[in-house]
Structure formats: structure tokens, C-alpha cells
Image (spheres, rainbow, N blue to C red):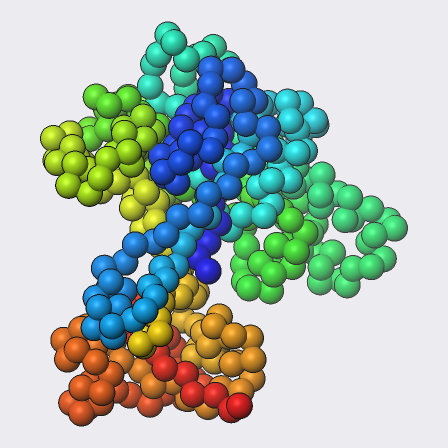
Amino acid sequence: MGFKCGIVGLPNVGKSTLFNALTASKNAEAANFPFCTIDPNIGIVDVVDKRLDQLTKLSNSKKKIYTNITFVDIAGLVEGASKGEGLGNKFLSHIRGVDAIIHLVRCFESEKITHVNSKINPVDDLETIKTEIILSDIDIIQKKLDKGKKKLLVEKEIKILEEKLKQLNDGNEVDIKDEIENKFLSSLGLLSIKPKIIVCNVDEESLVEGNSFTESVKNNHSDKKIVTICADIEDQIMGLDGNERETFMKEIGLNKTGLNQLIKEGYDLLNLDTFFTSGPEESRAWTVKKNTLAPKAASVIHTDFEKNFIRAETITCEDFIKYGSAEKCKENGKLRIEGKEYIVKDGDVLYFRVNP
């Protein structure tokens, strides 16, 4: 119901450690040698939302269901992956199934942990990943433009592919103009069009203020979302209970966990909103794209709801919590009847009416 993030990077940058911390698991083996992770590890994490907690309590719901994020720990990429080096195309194919990419780069020195290039340079590491993704996309487009397959394309599609191929050959990631291009290029499995978050993995001393490595990343990628995390500290935090976690975070000057940072940035990056349904049986959070019309939002609950949509009875989460129930909101004029053109807002509590 939420979104899927793939954690990618060079070998030994802390991907598996971060995955274990984010998913509060020990599913991903973390060790000091390349390609420790071969098949991707997958973990599903609840997006804890205090608004849903309150709705569940007020509705006396039997069940509470958060929306979630799926994290995929993908094997380390090396230079030449697009040509089959390392785990090559197996690595690249695992990225194709995610909604967003977390580019994890190592921003700390350590004699105990080797680096695949024998030096710590996160900017170069990001360039290596970018280059391999671009080369992979060039290969996909060139194959699509081969004489045989070209006959299956319409003129507009050929024009789009030729334009994007030029961008890639110039060393740039694909620039998407509109939803039509996005839908077509996404169907090809291009990697460079996927939204990205850069995560700088630092040591404990650099967690709050950063260091020269994180500064170099920010200076060279000012157009990207950048999050600073200490994977080892995250692993420790997730091993604590609620009160211990809060105390520990205060001691080290951390206001928000890496997981919460990534959730916030991920929702913003992918333009996502959350709406709620709430009643005696269950209270539940649902994820939709921003500016989603009510019938399309209803289809997230059940595909038939879109075509059978009649109306949406709508209450803001704030009003529901303030007045204590849907009935009280209705009595106080806070329940609205919205039709097919209504754009769902973040925090809406919705009751869909549909034809049987």
C-alpha cells in the first residue's frame, strides 16, 4: 500500500546494516567482503502515524492497519555492472521493480572495513552508480530502436526514444516532460527515471554536523534529496524499546530516526498523501498520489469502487479528532459530501458510497 525503496550502492558501504536497522531485523547478512548480499533482502515496515492511533482509539476499532514501506537491500554494484561485471544485470534487474532508489554512499573512514576502490570518495561512488545506470538505459533504448523492434513503435515513441538516447549519451539522466513520456518510459524499465534519495552513511561523530565527505556530496548534488544517517547507530536505536530509544536519541542529539527521515523524504519525493478510513471493525491508512480524485482513491480499497463510485463523505482528521466521531462531525457541520471531481487531501477521513 505504501511504496518500495531499493537500497543501492557500491559493496561495503553499509547497505545491509542500514536495511537491518530500518526493518528492525537481522535478515540481511552484513560482512566485510563484496557481494555479501546476492539475492535481494526484502523488509516491510509500518509507517507509524499518530493520527491513525487516535482514530483507532476514538472509533474503538478492532484492528489498526498502517500503510507501509518496502525496503529492498540490493547487492553491491561495481564499475562495469552494465556489461556484466560483478553481479551485473542481476543487480540492475532488481532495481527495476522499486518506486524509488536510495543511493547509499560511505562517508566515513575505517581501517576495519575495506572499500572496493581502496579510497573513500562518495562523489566518485555516486558517479559510478549513475554511469552504470545510464549505460544500462542506453542499452535498453538502443535495443528498442533496432530495426526489427522499431517497426512496432509509433512515430512519437521513436522520437521520444531518440531524444532520450541523446540525453543519456551526453552523460545525463533521462528528463521526463509529461505523464505520457513517464508512462511509456517506465514500461521499458528505464532506471535513470526513478526518483532518488542520496543517503550519506557517516560515523557517530559526524551524525549531527556531518563531515567533509557529506559536504562534498551536498556541493555536487544540490538538486537531490540528501539524508545523513549512521547505519550503526540506527541499528542500535531499533534494538531499544520506546523509552530507551527516546533517551538515547536525546543523548546523541538526534531528533528523528533515519527511518522517519526516509519516510518523510520518500513521501515528498514520490508526491504521496495519506487518507484514512475508520470504523468499529478497523481504522486504516491508505497511500495515494497527490491530487488523486476520489474515485481513484476509492479503487485503492477495492478496484470495483472506482466504477461504482457515488460519493465520498469527507471529514478532516483534525475535525474527527476534535469532535470524537463521524456522527459528532456531522452534527457540527464538519462532514462534507464530495463527488467524482473531489481531490483527496492528506489526512482526509473518507467514507465511500458505491453502487452494489
247 is higher (above) or lower (below) than 154: above
Residue 236 falls left or right of residue 133: left
Q: Looking at the rendering, which quadrant does residue 275 occupy?
A: bottom left
Give the percent coordinates (x, y) of residue 92.
Answer: 62, 36
**Which residue is drawn at the image coordinates 51% and 81% (left, top)?**
305
Whole-percent x, y for residue 350 in the image:
35, 78
On screen, residue 187 above or below 132: below
Residue at left 82%, top 54%?
150
Please report the residue visible at 39 percent of the width from the left and 40 percent of the height from the top.
23
Q: Find residue 139 and report its horizontal and vertical position in percent.
A: 71, 39
The reply, left or right, for residue 233 in relation to residue 34 is: left
Residue 169 lies in quadrant:
top right
For the residue pair 136 and 199, the one nearer the viewer reads as 199
Q: Is residue 124 something one can see in this rendering? A: no
Residue 211 placement (x, y as % from top left): 26, 23
Residue that protrudes farthest toward the top in the picture: 111
- The answer to which quarter of the image holds residue 216 is top left
